[in-house]
Image (tube, rainbow, N blue to C red):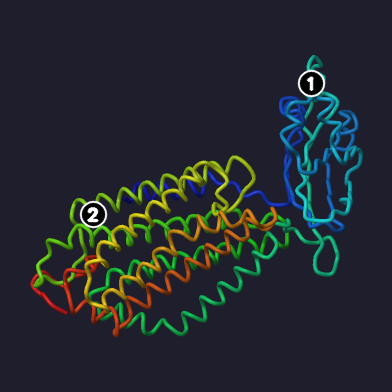
Amino acid sequence: MSYALATLVAAVLLGSEAFGKTVTGLFKSEAARQQIGQFVTKFMYQGDNGLLVCRLDNPALAVEKESRLLLYQDMDSDLDNLSCPDRLSRAQLTISLSREEHNQTIPRQSSPTAWQFLYADRYTCQESAVIPSHADLSFTVLLFNTDSAGNPLEHFSAEEAGLHSFYFLLLLAYFIASCIYIQPLYQALRKGGPMHTVLKVLTTALLLQVCSALCNYIHLARYSRDGVGIPLMGSLAEFWDMVSQVSMLYMLLSLCMGWTLSRGRKPQSRPLQWEQSPASTAVAVGGVITQGVLLLWEQYSESESEHHSYHAQQSLAGLLLMALRVGLALLLASVLYQIISTERSTLKRDFYLSFAKGCFLWFLCHPVLFLMSVIFNEHQREKVVTIGVILCQSISMVILYQLFLSRSLYWEVSSLSSVSLPLTMSRTNNRGRY
């Protein structure tokens, strides 16, 4: 388990690239020839007075190469079928690079529009020409949207605008909630009881979510000033969120499969215990490993292009992750249907239904929001999914906390029947009842 965790850390921290909107690199003639225009970056302008700043370390070399920066609006796949000269001529804007600094105002658009930036020079379309062996051209590109005052000083692209404020408000909500609930939660954890282990796992997952939000906020706060941020913080945010997802999945699967596998064979006299039969453990661990592999695959897929939150699910791995969540929700529905259909106690039936609400919200919010996002504009979709998933999963945790901390509901359920709720903890082997 520790080896798998170490692998996850290394893959997330070393395999992720966080591209900011201040881009520094080298214009390479060879790359421009192979790609029919070297890809530089992509940015979505809000539509009003967007600004592009390109700085060169060696303007004389740029003049010698006849270097130019090509700007394409909503670049489509049709360009791939064009010849090299035709492809370059389709650029909406062409900036000849001949000075140390170029400032280009982006034409006004009626709605937020994505622009792609490519580099080309005199050797791009001349396949037979020998590229001189002189040094590549160093550059820095800064991309700005307009701020609230109408000045081009905002580093965030249209699809990222508002996330910084969201994470600030989320951290504020976490802080206020912790001030209110930290004492009763601490007392519940200190006393132990039937749901001691569940509360520990749930609290750990929540703390990981808080760490993820904090890292995202730190990264975006820095990003708002320099357009780069702290890429390590962005990677850590995704790592903490992944570990939180895996922890919650293990807990929920253990609960559900414990109900299914142990309901018919636990005698009434046995105390509530954490279900660790080989079958339930295999199902829980199998689900965790599957999700972990898909999360790593998704992270690797996104690291090959511009950096996006994995909530966007723009790859095959992302779609498989959502399919896994739907499958787990169906498994949960099957388990709870079997239990509720034979349960006579109204109190316990209400408990199971409330638990189902929390679990369904956790598993299904992502696929549902992803499908709903198609009705929004392109620049709103990723924000809708990211913010929606975080809020829904936070609400799911609140529902589960209310159930497991409630002395008027769960504690009565646990005292009525010991064949339910197998994901619990016995204090000692000899101590039988709570």
Mark 1 is surrounded, within 10 Å at the Cα level, by few (under 14), some (14 to 19) or many (20 or more) other residues, namely some
Residue 38 screen position, x and y as percent: 74, 33
> What amino acid is found at the position of numbered circle 1 in the picture?
Ile
Q: Marks 1 and 2: in contact by CB < 8 Å? A: no
Give the spatial CA distance, label 2 vs label 1: 63 Å
Residue 414 screen position, x and y as percent: 21, 76
Residue 332 screen position, x and y as percent: 33, 59
Please tell me the numbered disc located at residue 280: 2
Compare residues 52 and 327 and report the one nearer the observer.
327
Q: Residue at x 24, y 53 (%)?
A: 281
Residue 240 screen position, x and y as percent: 47, 59
Compare residues 52 and 368 and report the one nearer the observer.
368
Question: At numbered mark 2, what does the secondary structure look like: helix, strand or loop?
Answer: helix
Q: Which residue in the structure is indicated by mark 1?
A: 131
Compare residues 233 and 393 and report the one nearer the observer.
393
Q: Residue at the top extreme?
A: 128
Number of the front mark, 2 or 1: 2
Mark 2 is surrounded, within 10 Å at the Cα level, by few (under 14), some (14 to 19) or many (20 or more) other residues, namely many
Q: Quadrant of the C terminus?
A: bottom left
Compare residues 53 and 310 and report the one nearer the observer.
310
| Left or right placement of residue 6 versus residue 47 in this view | left
Q: Which of the 4 image quarters holds residue 39?
A: top right
Q: Residue at x 64, y 64 (%)?
A: 163
Question: At numbered mark 1, what does the secondary structure look like: helix, strand or loop?
Answer: loop
Q: Which of the 4 image quarters holds residue 369?
A: bottom right
> What amino acid is found at the position of numbered circle 2 in the picture?
Ser
| Left or right placement of residue 113 versus residue 284 in this view | right
